[in-house]
Image (tube, grey):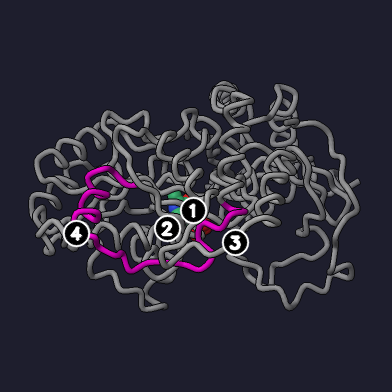
Amino acid sequence: MTSGTLDLGPAVDPAVDGDVEPLWQLLSPPSRFDSSNARVLGASGVRLRFADGVDALCASSGLWNVNIGYGNQAVADAVHRAMLDASYLTLFRRSHPWALEAARTLVELCGADTFGRVLFSTSGSAANDAMMKIVRHYWALRGQPGRRLVVGLRDSYHGLTYGSSALTGEDLAQDLYLVDRRFVRHVGHTDPAALRRLVTGAGAQIGAVVVEPVLGTGAHEIPDDFLAELIALREQYGFLLVADEVATGFGRTGTWFASQAWPATPDVMVLSKGLTNGTCAGSAVVVSHEIRAAFDEADAVLAHGETNAGTPPTCAAITATVAQMRQHDVVARGAALGERLGAGLAELVDRHPAAVAHRGRGCFRHLSLVRPDGEPYTPDDVVAALEAIRLAGAAVHPGPAGIQLVPPLIYTDDDLAELLDCVERGLTAVWTGRVDQLRA
Ligand code: PMP
Protein backbone atom coordinates (compact mmCIF):
# COMPACT_ATOMS: atom_id res chain seq x y z
CA MET A 1 0.00 0.00 0.00
CA THR A 2 1.51 3.28 -1.03
CA SER A 3 0.58 6.90 -0.84
CA GLY A 4 3.29 7.62 -3.44
CA THR A 5 3.41 9.54 -6.65
CA LEU A 6 0.93 9.47 -9.46
CA ASP A 7 1.51 6.53 -11.73
CA LEU A 8 -1.53 6.20 -13.94
CA GLY A 9 -2.34 3.83 -16.72
CA PRO A 10 -4.03 5.11 -19.87
CA ALA A 11 -6.67 7.71 -19.05
CA VAL A 12 -10.26 6.77 -19.68
CA ASP A 13 -12.13 9.87 -20.74
CA PRO A 14 -15.29 9.22 -22.71
CA ALA A 15 -16.21 12.91 -22.64
CA VAL A 16 -13.08 14.35 -24.22
CA ASP A 17 -14.81 17.36 -25.69
CA GLY A 18 -16.49 18.42 -22.51
CA ASP A 19 -19.74 16.85 -23.67
CA VAL A 20 -21.04 15.80 -20.28
CA GLU A 21 -24.69 16.63 -20.80
CA PRO A 22 -26.19 13.14 -20.55
CA LEU A 23 -24.61 12.69 -17.14
CA TRP A 24 -26.74 13.74 -14.17
CA GLN A 25 -24.07 15.07 -11.87
CA LEU A 26 -25.36 14.10 -8.42
CA LEU A 27 -25.90 16.79 -5.81
CA SER A 28 -24.56 19.41 -8.21
CA PRO A 29 -26.37 22.24 -9.96
CA PRO A 30 -26.22 21.51 -13.71
CA SER A 31 -25.30 25.11 -14.47
CA ARG A 32 -22.14 24.92 -12.42
CA PHE A 33 -20.70 21.80 -13.98
CA ASP A 34 -17.40 22.91 -15.41
CA SER A 35 -16.32 20.20 -17.79
CA SER A 36 -12.81 21.58 -18.14
CA ASN A 37 -11.76 20.88 -14.60
CA ALA A 38 -14.32 18.84 -12.73
CA ARG A 39 -13.56 15.53 -14.34
CA VAL A 40 -11.07 13.33 -12.58
CA LEU A 41 -9.34 11.28 -15.24
CA GLY A 42 -7.58 8.96 -12.90
CA ALA A 43 -6.39 8.33 -9.39
CA SER A 44 -3.60 6.43 -7.73
CA GLY A 45 -2.65 6.14 -4.08
CA VAL A 46 -3.64 9.52 -2.64
CA ARG A 47 -3.44 11.51 -5.87
CA LEU A 48 -5.91 12.60 -8.53
CA ARG A 49 -5.42 13.80 -12.07
CA PHE A 50 -7.96 16.30 -13.37
CA ALA A 51 -8.93 16.79 -17.00
CA ASP A 52 -7.28 20.24 -17.14
CA GLY A 53 -3.91 18.73 -16.27
CA VAL A 54 -3.93 19.59 -12.57
CA ASP A 55 -2.56 16.85 -10.32
CA ALA A 56 -3.84 17.13 -6.78
CA LEU A 57 -3.57 15.38 -3.46
CA CYS A 58 -6.92 13.86 -2.59
CA ALA A 59 -7.99 15.31 0.75
CA SER A 60 -11.60 14.15 0.66
CA SER A 61 -10.96 10.38 0.31
CA GLY A 62 -13.42 10.37 -2.59
CA LEU A 63 -16.61 11.03 -0.68
CA TRP A 64 -14.98 9.99 2.64
CA ASN A 65 -14.82 6.38 1.49
CA VAL A 66 -11.37 5.76 0.00
CA ASN A 67 -9.67 5.38 3.37
CA ILE A 68 -6.75 3.26 2.15
CA GLY A 69 -6.09 5.08 -1.11
CA TYR A 70 -6.98 4.49 -4.74
CA GLY A 71 -6.03 1.43 -6.72
CA ASN A 72 -5.27 -0.94 -3.88
CA GLN A 73 -4.01 -4.04 -5.66
CA ALA A 74 -5.04 -6.58 -3.01
CA VAL A 75 -8.63 -5.31 -2.94
CA ALA A 76 -8.79 -5.20 -6.74
CA ASP A 77 -7.46 -8.76 -6.99
CA ALA A 78 -10.00 -10.05 -4.48
CA VAL A 79 -12.88 -8.36 -6.31
CA HIS A 80 -11.63 -9.68 -9.63
CA ARG A 81 -11.50 -13.27 -8.40
CA ALA A 82 -14.99 -13.03 -6.92
CA MET A 83 -16.35 -11.64 -10.18
CA LEU A 84 -14.96 -14.56 -12.11
CA ASP A 85 -15.81 -17.38 -9.72
CA ALA A 86 -19.08 -16.67 -8.00
CA SER A 87 -22.83 -16.90 -8.31
CA TYR A 88 -24.40 -13.55 -7.50
CA LEU A 89 -27.65 -14.75 -5.94
CA THR A 90 -27.84 -13.72 -2.31
CA LEU A 91 -31.56 -13.87 -1.54
CA PHE A 92 -34.34 -16.43 -1.15
CA ARG A 93 -32.44 -18.96 0.98
CA ARG A 94 -29.27 -18.72 -1.09
CA SER A 95 -25.97 -17.25 -0.11
CA HIS A 96 -22.27 -17.73 -0.82
CA PRO A 97 -19.01 -18.06 1.10
CA TRP A 98 -17.90 -14.49 0.39
CA ALA A 99 -20.93 -13.12 2.24
CA LEU A 100 -20.44 -15.45 5.20
CA GLU A 101 -16.81 -14.51 5.47
CA ALA A 102 -17.52 -10.76 5.24
CA ALA A 103 -20.32 -11.05 7.84
CA ARG A 104 -18.02 -12.91 10.23
CA THR A 105 -15.31 -10.32 9.70
CA LEU A 106 -17.67 -7.45 10.48
CA VAL A 107 -19.18 -9.06 13.57
CA GLU A 108 -15.71 -9.67 14.93
CA LEU A 109 -14.59 -6.13 14.11
CA CYS A 110 -17.64 -4.49 15.68
CA GLY A 111 -17.44 -6.77 18.73
CA ALA A 112 -18.72 -10.36 18.75
CA ASP A 113 -19.79 -9.98 22.40
CA THR A 114 -22.50 -7.54 21.33
CA PHE A 115 -23.14 -8.11 17.65
CA GLY A 116 -24.55 -11.25 16.09
CA ARG A 117 -25.75 -10.67 12.54
CA VAL A 118 -25.07 -8.60 9.46
CA LEU A 119 -27.51 -7.51 6.75
CA PHE A 120 -25.88 -6.39 3.53
CA SER A 121 -27.27 -3.52 1.50
CA THR A 122 -26.05 -1.34 -1.32
CA SER A 123 -25.59 2.19 0.08
CA GLY A 124 -25.60 4.08 3.34
CA SER A 125 -29.07 5.38 2.52
CA ALA A 126 -30.53 1.95 1.79
CA ALA A 127 -28.86 0.51 4.90
CA ASN A 128 -30.56 3.18 7.01
CA ASP A 129 -33.89 2.26 5.42
CA ALA A 130 -33.27 -1.37 6.32
CA MET A 131 -32.16 -0.35 9.82
CA MET A 132 -35.45 1.44 10.50
CA LYS A 133 -37.41 -1.59 9.29
CA ILE A 134 -35.35 -3.82 11.56
CA VAL A 135 -36.02 -1.52 14.54
CA ARG A 136 -39.80 -1.50 13.98
CA HIS A 137 -39.98 -5.21 13.22
CA TYR A 138 -37.89 -5.98 16.30
CA TRP A 139 -40.27 -4.10 18.59
CA ALA A 140 -43.27 -5.76 16.99
CA LEU A 141 -41.65 -9.15 17.58
CA ARG A 142 -41.00 -8.20 21.21
CA GLY A 143 -44.66 -7.29 21.70
CA GLN A 144 -44.21 -3.52 21.68
CA PRO A 145 -45.48 -2.44 18.24
CA GLY A 146 -46.21 1.02 19.65
CA ARG A 147 -42.52 1.85 19.60
CA ARG A 148 -42.79 3.37 16.15
CA LEU A 149 -40.82 6.58 16.53
CA VAL A 150 -37.22 6.94 15.48
CA VAL A 151 -35.26 9.89 16.84
CA GLY A 152 -32.43 11.48 14.89
CA LEU A 153 -30.27 14.54 15.38
CA ARG A 154 -31.00 17.90 13.89
CA ASP A 155 -28.49 18.69 11.07
CA SER A 156 -27.60 15.01 10.75
CA TYR A 157 -27.22 13.21 7.43
CA HIS A 158 -28.42 9.62 6.98
CA GLY A 159 -29.08 9.51 3.26
CA LEU A 160 -31.53 10.56 0.58
CA THR A 161 -33.76 7.59 -0.18
CA TYR A 162 -37.28 8.21 1.14
CA GLY A 163 -36.76 6.44 4.45
CA SER A 164 -33.28 7.73 5.20
CA SER A 165 -34.30 11.18 3.98
CA ALA A 166 -36.98 11.27 6.67
CA LEU A 167 -34.31 10.55 9.27
CA THR A 168 -31.82 13.04 7.85
CA GLY A 169 -31.97 16.15 10.02
CA GLU A 170 -30.59 18.54 7.43
CA ASP A 171 -33.12 20.30 5.30
CA LEU A 172 -32.75 18.56 1.92
CA ALA A 173 -36.02 19.19 0.12
CA GLN A 174 -37.98 16.67 2.21
CA ASP A 175 -41.09 18.85 1.92
CA LEU A 176 -40.78 19.21 -1.86
CA TYR A 177 -40.51 15.43 -2.27
CA LEU A 178 -43.32 14.71 0.20
CA VAL A 179 -41.11 12.68 2.50
CA ASP A 180 -43.25 11.29 5.30
CA ARG A 181 -41.68 12.29 8.61
CA ARG A 182 -44.59 11.45 10.89
CA PHE A 183 -42.62 8.77 12.70
CA VAL A 184 -39.37 10.66 13.07
CA ARG A 185 -38.35 13.27 15.65
CA HIS A 186 -35.22 15.42 15.65
CA VAL A 187 -33.30 16.92 18.50
CA GLY A 188 -30.23 19.18 18.60
CA HIS A 189 -26.95 17.44 19.43
CA THR A 190 -25.93 20.10 21.93
CA ASP A 191 -29.21 20.02 23.84
CA PRO A 192 -29.40 17.14 26.32
CA ALA A 193 -32.33 18.84 28.07
CA ALA A 194 -34.39 18.77 24.85
CA LEU A 195 -33.52 15.09 24.43
CA ARG A 196 -34.76 14.39 27.97
CA ARG A 197 -37.98 16.30 27.33
CA LEU A 198 -38.60 14.37 24.12
CA VAL A 199 -37.91 10.98 25.66
CA THR A 200 -39.84 11.58 28.87
CA GLY A 201 -42.80 12.75 26.78
CA ALA A 202 -42.76 9.95 24.19
CA GLY A 203 -40.50 7.29 25.75
CA ALA A 204 -42.83 4.33 25.30
CA GLN A 205 -43.20 5.14 21.60
CA ILE A 206 -39.52 5.48 20.81
CA GLY A 207 -38.02 2.51 19.00
CA ALA A 208 -34.53 3.88 18.50
CA VAL A 209 -32.31 6.91 18.71
CA VAL A 210 -29.92 7.16 15.77
CA VAL A 211 -26.67 9.07 16.15
CA GLU A 212 -23.96 10.04 13.71
CA PRO A 213 -20.97 9.92 16.09
CA VAL A 214 -19.49 12.93 14.33
CA LEU A 215 -22.05 14.93 12.33
CA GLY A 216 -20.58 14.60 8.86
CA THR A 217 -21.78 17.95 7.57
CA GLY A 218 -19.47 20.32 9.42
CA ALA A 219 -17.63 17.60 11.42
CA HIS A 220 -19.41 18.45 14.67
CA GLU A 221 -18.54 16.13 17.53
CA ILE A 222 -21.30 14.96 19.87
CA PRO A 223 -20.61 16.55 23.28
CA ASP A 224 -19.98 14.17 26.20
CA ASP A 225 -22.90 15.50 28.25
CA PHE A 226 -25.32 14.75 25.40
CA LEU A 227 -23.98 11.21 25.05
CA ALA A 228 -24.16 10.66 28.82
CA GLU A 229 -27.78 11.80 28.87
CA LEU A 230 -28.62 9.63 25.88
CA ILE A 231 -27.13 6.57 27.50
CA ALA A 232 -28.89 7.25 30.83
CA LEU A 233 -32.22 7.63 29.01
CA ARG A 234 -31.64 4.42 27.09
CA GLU A 235 -31.14 2.60 30.42
CA GLN A 236 -34.38 4.04 31.70
CA TYR A 237 -36.60 3.79 28.63
CA GLY A 238 -35.11 0.81 26.80
CA PHE A 239 -35.03 2.16 23.25
CA LEU A 240 -32.39 0.88 20.85
CA LEU A 241 -29.28 2.94 20.24
CA VAL A 242 -28.06 3.05 16.64
CA ALA A 243 -24.68 4.39 15.52
CA ASP A 244 -24.69 5.50 11.91
CA GLU A 245 -21.01 4.86 11.26
CA VAL A 246 -21.30 5.20 7.49
CA ALA A 247 -18.81 8.07 7.48
CA THR A 248 -17.05 7.58 10.82
CA GLY A 249 -16.27 3.87 10.44
CA PHE A 250 -13.08 2.15 9.36
CA GLY A 251 -10.59 4.37 11.14
CA ARG A 252 -11.90 7.73 10.03
CA THR A 253 -11.91 9.26 13.53
CA GLY A 254 -8.93 7.41 15.05
CA THR A 255 -10.58 4.13 16.15
CA TRP A 256 -12.07 1.38 13.99
CA PHE A 257 -15.48 2.84 14.77
CA ALA A 258 -16.21 6.18 16.42
CA SER A 259 -18.81 4.65 18.75
CA GLN A 260 -16.05 2.52 20.27
CA ALA A 261 -15.08 5.71 22.13
CA TRP A 262 -18.61 5.97 23.62
CA PRO A 263 -19.28 4.96 27.23
CA ALA A 264 -21.83 2.35 25.99
CA THR A 265 -22.09 0.01 23.02
CA PRO A 266 -24.87 0.62 20.48
CA ASP A 267 -27.40 -2.08 19.54
CA VAL A 268 -26.99 -1.47 15.82
CA MET A 269 -24.19 -0.14 13.66
CA VAL A 270 -24.73 1.05 10.09
CA LEU A 271 -21.65 0.83 7.86
CA SER A 272 -20.74 1.82 4.32
CA LYS A 273 -18.15 4.11 2.65
CA GLY A 274 -14.80 2.78 3.96
CA LEU A 275 -16.35 -0.70 4.10
CA THR A 276 -15.26 -1.44 0.53
CA ASN A 277 -12.83 1.47 0.24
CA GLY A 278 -15.18 2.82 -2.40
CA THR A 279 -14.54 -0.02 -4.84
CA CYS A 280 -17.98 -1.63 -4.84
CA ALA A 281 -21.36 -0.27 -3.80
CA GLY A 282 -22.00 -1.83 -0.43
CA SER A 283 -23.22 -1.28 3.09
CA ALA A 284 -24.04 -3.30 6.16
CA VAL A 285 -26.39 -3.18 9.14
CA VAL A 286 -24.77 -4.96 12.08
CA VAL A 287 -27.25 -5.92 14.81
CA SER A 288 -26.98 -7.15 18.39
CA HIS A 289 -27.48 -10.74 19.56
CA GLU A 290 -30.75 -9.63 21.15
CA ILE A 291 -32.13 -8.36 17.81
CA ARG A 292 -30.92 -11.48 16.08
CA ALA A 293 -32.61 -13.59 18.77
CA ALA A 294 -35.94 -11.83 18.29
CA PHE A 295 -35.97 -12.70 14.58
CA ASP A 296 -34.61 -16.22 15.16
CA GLU A 297 -37.13 -17.11 17.85
CA ALA A 298 -40.05 -16.06 15.64
CA ASP A 299 -38.41 -17.34 12.45
CA ALA A 300 -39.38 -13.91 11.12
CA VAL A 301 -38.65 -12.77 7.58
CA LEU A 302 -37.56 -9.14 7.35
CA ALA A 303 -39.25 -7.67 4.29
CA HIS A 304 -36.12 -6.10 2.96
CA GLY A 305 -33.86 -7.29 0.19
CA GLU A 306 -31.93 -5.92 -2.75
CA THR A 307 -30.78 -7.95 -5.73
CA ASN A 308 -27.29 -6.53 -5.61
CA ALA A 309 -26.81 -6.51 -1.84
CA GLY A 310 -23.86 -8.51 -0.58
CA THR A 311 -22.65 -9.72 -3.96
CA PRO A 312 -19.41 -11.74 -4.00
CA PRO A 313 -17.33 -8.82 -5.39
CA THR A 314 -18.66 -6.46 -2.72
CA CYS A 315 -18.10 -8.99 0.06
CA ALA A 316 -14.63 -9.81 -1.26
CA ALA A 317 -13.89 -6.08 -1.23
CA ILE A 318 -15.01 -5.86 2.40
CA THR A 319 -12.88 -8.77 3.56
CA ALA A 320 -9.85 -7.60 1.59
CA THR A 321 -10.18 -3.99 2.75
CA VAL A 322 -10.30 -5.03 6.40
CA ALA A 323 -7.33 -7.36 5.84
CA GLN A 324 -5.32 -4.56 4.23
CA MET A 325 -6.16 -2.21 7.08
CA ARG A 326 -5.03 -4.77 9.65
CA GLN A 327 -1.89 -5.71 7.77
CA HIS A 328 -0.77 -2.09 7.37
CA ASP A 329 -1.94 -0.89 10.76
CA VAL A 330 -4.06 1.74 9.06
CA VAL A 331 -6.22 2.65 12.06
CA ALA A 332 -3.20 3.56 14.22
CA ARG A 333 -1.61 5.34 11.28
CA GLY A 334 -4.81 7.32 10.68
CA ALA A 335 -5.08 8.20 14.38
CA ALA A 336 -1.55 9.64 14.41
CA LEU A 337 -2.18 11.45 11.13
CA GLY A 338 -5.42 12.88 12.51
CA GLU A 339 -3.59 14.34 15.52
CA ARG A 340 -1.06 16.02 13.27
CA LEU A 341 -3.81 17.28 10.95
CA GLY A 342 -5.62 18.83 13.93
CA ALA A 343 -2.40 20.50 15.10
CA GLY A 344 -1.70 21.79 11.59
CA LEU A 345 -5.18 23.29 11.34
CA ALA A 346 -4.81 24.93 14.75
CA GLU A 347 -1.62 26.60 13.50
CA LEU A 348 -3.39 27.71 10.34
CA VAL A 349 -6.16 29.29 12.41
CA ASP A 350 -3.50 31.16 14.41
CA ARG A 351 -1.68 32.31 11.34
CA HIS A 352 -4.14 32.89 8.50
CA PRO A 353 -6.75 35.67 8.51
CA ALA A 354 -9.28 33.59 6.53
CA ALA A 355 -9.16 30.59 8.90
CA VAL A 356 -11.09 31.23 12.10
CA ALA A 357 -11.85 27.87 13.72
CA HIS A 358 -11.44 24.15 13.23
CA ARG A 359 -13.20 21.15 14.67
CA GLY A 360 -13.61 17.44 14.19
CA ARG A 361 -11.76 14.31 15.18
CA GLY A 362 -9.11 12.11 13.60
CA CYS A 363 -8.99 12.48 9.84
CA PHE A 364 -12.45 14.07 9.76
CA ARG A 365 -12.03 17.85 10.11
CA HIS A 366 -13.73 21.12 9.27
CA LEU A 367 -12.07 24.52 8.87
CA SER A 368 -14.33 27.60 9.23
CA LEU A 369 -13.49 30.46 6.88
CA VAL A 370 -14.25 34.17 6.72
CA ARG A 371 -13.93 36.73 3.94
CA PRO A 372 -11.81 39.87 4.18
CA ASP A 373 -14.97 41.76 5.24
CA GLY A 374 -15.24 39.44 8.24
CA GLU A 375 -18.37 37.68 6.99
CA PRO A 376 -18.49 33.85 7.00
CA TYR A 377 -17.98 32.12 3.66
CA THR A 378 -21.10 31.80 1.50
CA PRO A 379 -21.64 28.65 -0.62
CA ASP A 380 -20.15 30.58 -3.60
CA ASP A 381 -17.09 31.49 -1.54
CA VAL A 382 -16.69 27.82 -0.67
CA VAL A 383 -16.78 26.85 -4.36
CA ALA A 384 -14.16 29.52 -5.11
CA ALA A 385 -11.92 28.31 -2.27
CA LEU A 386 -12.20 24.68 -3.38
CA GLU A 387 -11.07 25.70 -6.84
CA ALA A 388 -8.17 27.80 -5.57
CA ILE A 389 -6.98 25.00 -3.31
CA ARG A 390 -7.33 22.52 -6.17
CA LEU A 391 -5.18 24.75 -8.37
CA ALA A 392 -2.69 24.91 -5.51
CA GLY A 393 -2.64 21.11 -5.57
CA ALA A 394 -5.18 19.59 -3.15
CA ALA A 395 -8.78 18.43 -3.61
CA VAL A 396 -10.69 19.17 -0.41
CA HIS A 397 -14.38 18.75 0.42
CA PRO A 398 -16.91 21.59 0.74
CA GLY A 399 -18.31 22.26 4.20
CA PRO A 400 -20.78 24.72 5.70
CA ALA A 401 -19.02 28.13 5.66
CA GLY A 402 -15.70 26.39 5.18
CA ILE A 403 -13.92 23.33 3.91
CA GLN A 404 -13.59 19.78 5.15
CA LEU A 405 -10.33 17.88 5.27
CA VAL A 406 -10.90 14.16 5.10
CA PRO A 407 -7.64 12.64 3.84
CA PRO A 408 -7.00 8.98 3.15
CA LEU A 409 -5.56 7.42 6.32
CA ILE A 410 -2.36 6.42 4.52
CA TYR A 411 -0.91 9.90 3.99
CA THR A 412 2.79 10.23 4.76
CA ASP A 413 4.12 13.17 6.79
CA ASP A 414 5.16 14.76 3.51
CA ASP A 415 1.65 14.38 2.09
CA LEU A 416 0.22 16.11 5.14
CA ALA A 417 2.71 18.97 4.93
CA GLU A 418 1.87 19.33 1.25
CA LEU A 419 -1.86 19.40 1.99
CA LEU A 420 -1.53 22.12 4.61
CA ASP A 421 0.67 24.14 2.27
CA CYS A 422 -1.85 23.82 -0.59
CA VAL A 423 -4.72 24.87 1.66
CA GLU A 424 -2.78 27.88 2.87
CA ARG A 425 -1.71 28.95 -0.63
CA GLY A 426 -5.25 28.52 -1.95
CA LEU A 427 -6.77 30.54 0.88
CA THR A 428 -4.16 33.27 0.49
CA ALA A 429 -4.87 33.48 -3.25
CA VAL A 430 -8.59 33.89 -2.55
CA TRP A 431 -7.93 36.43 0.21
CA THR A 432 -5.68 38.56 -2.00
CA GLY A 433 -7.72 38.10 -5.20
CA ARG A 434 -4.86 36.36 -6.97
CA VAL A 435 -6.30 32.98 -7.86
CA ASP A 436 -5.27 33.52 -11.49
CA GLN A 437 -1.64 33.31 -10.45
CA LEU A 438 -2.20 29.73 -9.36
CA ARG A 439 -3.25 28.90 -12.91
CA ALA A 440 -0.02 30.21 -14.37
N1 PMP B 1 -25.09 8.16 6.75
C1 PMP B 1 -24.02 8.94 6.86
C2 PMP B 1 -23.50 9.26 8.22
C3 PMP B 1 -23.37 9.43 5.71
O1 PMP B 1 -22.30 10.22 5.83
C4 PMP B 1 -23.88 9.09 4.44
C5 PMP B 1 -23.22 9.57 3.15
N2 PMP B 1 -22.55 10.75 3.20
C6 PMP B 1 -25.02 8.27 4.39
C7 PMP B 1 -25.59 7.81 5.54
C8 PMP B 1 -25.62 7.88 3.07
O2 PMP B 1 -24.79 7.03 2.40
P1 PMP B 1 -24.92 6.82 0.81
O3 PMP B 1 -24.48 8.09 0.18
O4 PMP B 1 -24.03 5.66 0.52
O5 PMP B 1 -26.35 6.51 0.53
Q: Is residue 58 left or right of residue 299?
A: right
Separation of residues labelled 1 and 4 (CA atoms): 26 Å
Q: Residue at x 43, y 71 (%)?
A: 173
Separation of residues labelled 4 and 2 (CA atoms): 23 Å
From the image, tell me which residue sits under label 2. 127
Query: Which segment is the magenta one?
Result: 287-314
From the image, tell me which residue sits under label 4. 298
From the image, tell me which residue sits under label 1. 283
Q: Amino acid at mark 3?
A: Ser
Label placed on residue 87: 3
Helix or strand or loop: what does disc 1 sit on?
A: strand
Q: Is mark 1 within 8 Å of ligand 1?
A: yes
Separation of residues labelled 2 and 1 (CA atoms): 6 Å
Look at discs 4 and 2 and give the one toward the viewer.
4
Marks 1 and 4 close (CB-CB < 8 Å): no
Separation of residues labelled 1 and 3 (CA atoms): 19 Å
Mark 2 or mark 1: which comes first in sequence?
2
Q: Quadrant of residue 420?
A: top right
Q: Label 1: how many residues lie within 10 Å, few (<14), some (14-19) or many (20+)? A: many
